[in-house]
Image: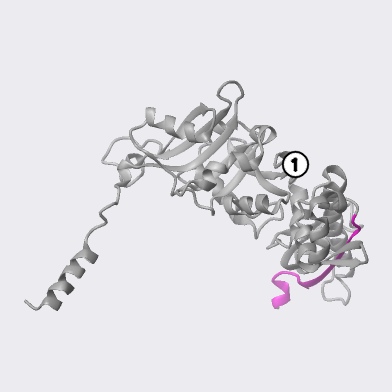
Amino acid sequence: MNRKLLSLLVCILIVLTACWDSNEIEDLGMIIGVGLDYKGGEEPFSMTNQYVVPNNIPGMQSGGALSNPYQNLTLNGKNFFEIIRENSLETDRPPNFTHLKSLVISDKILKQEPAHKIISFFLRDHEFRRTVPVFITKENVATIMNVEPTKEMFPAVQIKELTQNIDRSLHVQDNLTFGDLSEHISDRSSFVIPEIGINQNRVRLLGAAIISSEDYKLAGWLEPEEVGGLKWIKDTVKGGLVTIDREHSPEDQVVLEINEAKTKIEPVLKGDQLTININVNGSLKLAEDWNMERNVFKKGWDDAMKKDAEEIVSESMEQVIDIAQNDFKLDFLDLGTWVRINHPSYWKKNKDKWNTLFSEVPIHVDVNFKITGFGTQDLV
């Protein structure tokens, strides 16, 4: 046989060989959710691992009654690597984190320990992906990991999917991933973590936790309404509603749907005096109107509505700015990033005392909307 042909056949055989180092799913301790809590005492840390039970997944069962396709295993220890190794005493399957869907951290642990110490193991281990979303809760973590999912097969997956409606509500934040968290710590910047809780035996998105750049511990909380103001500031609005209630409107309540939104942040430096201008432009559509006498075909019908919407969004942004500057004196608004980009010399000189300077910086908000439609009537 021709040597070249023989070499080609050998190469083909090697390429077509099955995965020599593959593992069957039934032989892996596949973990899709992790919860971290603080208990105190000699073994202060608690870790809940949510394992997939392949034999209980519909379609993989040979028969019999359906059981939970997941199992939660909670253990305590002095650190998380030791806890993971303790898992080996209770299961014959080595834990595997390559398919991790969500990480839930208790507020208690972030009051005791800084975030960069808590996630050190997870960022160093090769099985943990930087795209895994992180959440915080005031609930017992083991309890929240046991809440029966309503839409998904696994609680960890349902927790991850809570942020999928970011284009539907101003109260829904985008995911904060391991990678995002690591970048904030590397940049020495404050940030927020989406909060989840339990409502009527269902897991629900709430507000957000503020993590301080001073010590990377929990500094405080934002309510769901304040999350909306934060999203306008950080240019992360992808949709949602602006509601003009009776307090703002002399007529009746109106609901406007956000079509487009764009926030521009402009730091202005004159000498050593820094000011920050935040300009919001967007288009809204009339979605619900309780004033049945309104004539939308009359010129200027939307003037008062537009002004009210601008005032409401400005107030929500200014409220969050006040919380950042006066209540916490922490730039979790991420305005320092824009100062660093636009005025690098000023930033290099002042970055170590930015939180102190930030609390005194004048911040001006300007919101401009246009109302582009009023539902299906504008198609007539």
Tell whether position 368 is magenta. Answer: yes
Camera-side residue of 218 and 297: 218
Colour pattern of the rendering: one colour
Report the label total. 1
Q: Is residue 95 left or right of residue 229?
A: left
Q: Is residue 235 left or right of residue 80?
A: right
The C terminus: image quadrant: bottom right
Q: Is residue 352 left or right of residue 193?
A: right
Q: Residue at x 38, y 35 (%)?
A: 67
Kindly identify the amino acid type of the residue bearing the numbered disc 1.
Trp
Q: Residue at x 82, y 48 (%)?
A: 324
Q: Position of residue 138 (x, y in %)?
A: 66, 34
Instruction: Tell me where the magenta segment starts and ends, as one range.
Output: 361-379
Camera-side residue of 122 and 143: 122
Q: Position of residue 1 (x, y in %)?
A: 6, 76
Q: Relative to 323, is 263 above or below? A: below
Residue 150 can be seen, yes or no: no
SS type, badge 1? strand
Q: Position of residue 370 (x, y in %)?
A: 81, 72
Residue 341 can be seen, yes or no: yes
The image quarter in which residue 289 lies:
bottom right
From the image, tell me which residue sits under label 1: 221
Q: Relative to 359, is 201 above or below? A: above
Q: Residue at x 88, y 77 (%)?
A: 299
Residue with the most extreme top position: 41
